Amino acid sequence: MRERLAGLTSNILNPFLLSFVVIILLAVESTDSASEALKWALISIALSVLPVFVVIMCLVRQKKLEGFFANPRQQRNGIYILASALGVIGCGVMWYFKAPELLRVTFIAGLVAIVVFMVINRFWKISLHTAFMSASVTIVTIVYGTAGVLTILLLPALAWARIRLNQHSPAQVVTGALLSAVILLVMFWGFGVL
């Protein structure tokens, strides 16, 4: 029962779904109309979440990755390179077309985090699940204040799930969560969003 609950928690609170939700929230919060929000949400998802999702899905089907959310550290290298390249392209597109500031700064923070995690991944398998959850909690708290703080309750549940599934050690889930929150806060502070 605990194994099934851990698997369900890990699958629901996955990096792709969290990114999708955060992008939509930021697009809605930082634009004046539904059409603008939809435009920037679709552009953001097309530049970040969707391509990585499709590539991982194809690699899993071709048996080049062990699983969608469960794979050895060495299998992540190519995904990190792809995500970094998409991050650079995404940042360029967002700045060139003057995307809403919240989305631009979030893309920059995401690129910095991807590069830092890619370097760490050469030696250690940091938890992307808790990193994305922590970043999501941080963003939602910045944007929505006290109401956003409640999302922090999801972080321990996800950390437990990743440990229970033997995907990460306690140190890996904690490091992923702390590092992503710090990167996000530094970037938001540096660009004057805080």
Image (cartoon, rainbow, N blue to C red):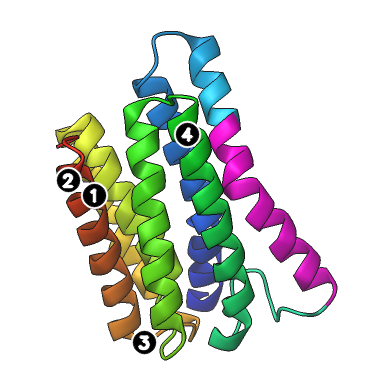
Q: Amino acid at mark 2?
A: Gly
N-terminal-most mark, 4 or 1: 4
Is disc 1 placed on a helix, strand or loop?
helix
Mainly helix, strand or loop, the magenta region?
helix
Which residue is disc 1 drawn over? 187
Residue 169, numbered circle? 3
N-terminal-most mark, 3 or 1: 3
Task: Please name the residue shown 60% across and 30% down the image.
Answer: 42
Which residue is disc 2 drawn over? 190
Which residue is disc 4 drawn over? 94
Residue interval drawn in magenta: 43-62
Mark 2 near mark 4, Cβ–Cβ under 8 Å? no
Given residues 121 and 168, the one toward you in this image is 121
Q: Amino acid at mark 4?
A: Met
* Residue situated furthest right in the rendering: 62
Mark 2 near mark 1, Cβ–Cβ under 8 Å? yes
